[in-house]
Image (cartoon, rainbow, N blue to C red):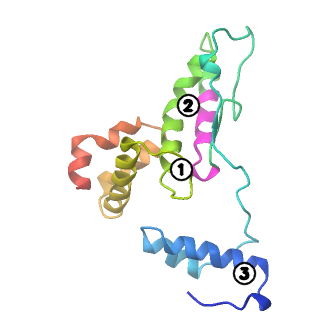
């Protein structure tokens, strides 16, 4: 890491330096090497949404007839994980299939897996101020090991990609076949 004289550096250079420092801390060194050698396409842009939010319309005792809550209204996710787009696609699929009783409880099923994944991923960052129950600490420890295993094991990589793309439920990465390969 080079030392920079603040008097001769623009804010954008400080942002790039901070981004590189964060990339260097990742468990996969190759990401840092690619980012370091890359040319930026534009100025860095900070993520402005301060929190992930879930509004539990599905827990209301009654919900107004004829209304449908979709998109970011029930759940707002950190955009780097892309769950918002995946959940929106699941909502659109349900609408296209013309399912009856498209209530908040129906859509909650689509949000549940994405929400659990988002919360676990956010709590992996030490900067997030929130309690970390033992299960979350274990899962984040396990996910770190899974990421390392996925770099050199195609079956682990595919299992993880299926979970983050919401093709299979998150507990599937704890299947004994995957556990064995991770450890």
Mark 2–mark 3 Cα distance, whole angstroms, equals 38 Å
Q: Residues within 10 Å of mark 2 (few under 14, many from 20)?
A: many
What element does badge 3 sit on?
Answer: helix
What element does badge 2 sit on?
Answer: helix
- Residue 115 image offset from top left, x and y in percent: 54, 37
Locate residue 183 relative to residue 132 in the image: left or right: left
Q: Is residue 37 above or below residue 121?
A: below
Nearest the eye: 30 or 73: 73
Quadrant the C terminus occupies: bottom left
Locate residue 177 relative to residue 96 in the image: left or right: left
- Within the magenta stretch, is there residue 52? no
Nearest the eye: 99 or 24: 24
Q: Residues within 10 Å of mark 1 (few under 14, many from 20)?
A: many
- Specify the label residue 13 is tagged with: 3
The magenta segment: 79-92
| Residue 39 visible within the image | no
Q: Is residue 24 above or below residue 107?
A: below
Q: Is residue 21 above or below residue 50?
A: below
* Residue drawn at (43%, 42%) of the image: 163
| Residue 48 visible within the image | yes
* Residue drawn at (74%, 64%) of the image: 45
- Specify the label residue 122 is tagged with: 1
SS majority, magenta: helix
């Amino acid at each position: 890491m080079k030392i920079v004289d603040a008097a001769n550096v623009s804010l954008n250079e400080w942002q790039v330096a901070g981004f590189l420092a964060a990339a260097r801390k990742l468990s996969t060194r190759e990401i840092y090497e690619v980012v370091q050698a890359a040319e930026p396409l534009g100025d860095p842009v900070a993520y402005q949404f301060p929190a992930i939010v879930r509004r539990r319309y599905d827990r209301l005792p009654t919900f107004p007839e004829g209304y449908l809550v979709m998109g970011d209204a029930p759940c707002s996710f950190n955009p780097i994980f892309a769950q918002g787009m995946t959940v929106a696609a699941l909502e659109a699929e349900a609408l296209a299939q013309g399912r009856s009783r498209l209530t908040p409880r129906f859509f909650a099923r689509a949000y549940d897996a994405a929400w659990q994944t988002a919360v676990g991923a956010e709590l992996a960052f030490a900067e997030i101020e929130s309690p970390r129950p033992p299960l979350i600490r274990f899962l984040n420890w396990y996910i770190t090991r899974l990421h390392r295993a996925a770099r050199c094991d195609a079956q682990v990589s595919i299992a993880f990609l299926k979970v983050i793309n919401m093709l299979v439920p998150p507990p599937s990465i704890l299947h004994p076949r995957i556990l064995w390969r991770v450890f």
